[in-house]
Image: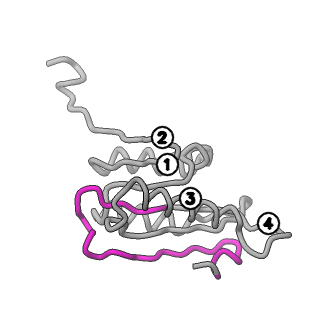
Amino acid sequence: MFSNMMKNNSHRVDYLNFKAIGMDDSFGIYVRGCLKEDQPYSIEAKRRLFTCLDFARQQLDEEKLVAVYMDIIDLKKSKNLAFQEMDADLKKGLFEKVLFADLEEIFADSELNEKIISLSESVEGIEFLDVQGNVFEAKKISLNQIIGV
């Protein structure tokens, strides 16, 4: 995993607990970071990964961690390939939650913001959370409930 942190525009997906696939409270972790010219690896991605893993160990059932997705991006031409794989896995029902180090950083990226909104509208029961306790979950509301029938 750390070798991917040494290359811009790289991604990696590690599947960990196949028994947890589709279980209640199963989750994935998504981290991303940039590789700056003066760094041997993405310090940002490493910090976010360790922060998420520590949070999962302390606050979640780490046996329900299905996969870790990591993108090392170049801000000029980011592809977010691991995010795309996570998107596909969520649609397949592999897990129902995604843990991020910082949801605000993800929502600040307009492309990822649109993808998260789209996911929340198309995958029922999905939850996005971060280590600061922020949660984003969009539940579907029936039309009858909206118009008060």
Name the residue furthest left.
149
Q: In terms of depth relative to the viewer, which is nearer, 138 or 48?
A: 48
Residue under the image location 60 percent in, 65 percent down:
79
Instruction: For mark 3, give the secondary structure.
Output: helix
Q: Amino acid at mark 2?
A: Asn
From the top left corner, tell me how far across and down residue 84 is, in percent: 48, 64
Residue under the image location 63 percent in, 75 percent down:
10
Q: Amino acid at mark 4?
A: Lys
From the top left corner, tell me how far across and down residue 139 is, in percent: 30, 38
Looking at the image, tell me whether mark 2 or mark 4 is earlier in sequence order: 4
Estimate the spatial distance between the alpha carbons at disc 1 and disc 2, rounded to whole Å: 5 Å
- As displayed, is residue 121 above or below residue 11? above
Instruction: For mark 2, give the secondary structure.
Output: loop
Residues marked 3 and 2 touching at CB (< 8 Å): no
Give the magenta-colored segment's residue range.
3-29
Residues marked 1 and 2 touching at CB (< 8 Å): yes
Q: Left or right: where does residue 133 sit relative to residue 110?
A: left
Q: Amino acid at mark 3?
A: Thr
Specify the quadrant of the image occupied by residue 99. Answer: bottom left
Estimate the spatial distance between the alpha carbons at disc 3 and disc 2, rounded to whole Å: 15 Å
Q: In terms of depth relative to the viewer, which is nearer, 51 or 72?
A: 51
> Does the stretch in magenta take in 26?
yes
* Quarter of the N terminus within the rendering: bottom right
The circle on residue 130 is 1
Identify the residue position indicated by label 3 in the image.
51
Q: Left or right: where does residue 51 sit relative to residue 63?
A: right
Specify the quadrant of the image occupied by residue 38. Answer: bottom right
Identify the residue position indicated by label 4 in the image.
36
Looking at the image, tell me whether mark 3 or mark 4 is earlier in sequence order: 4
Identify the residue position indicated by label 2 in the image.
134
The circle on residue 37 is none
* Quarter of the C terminus within the rendering: top left
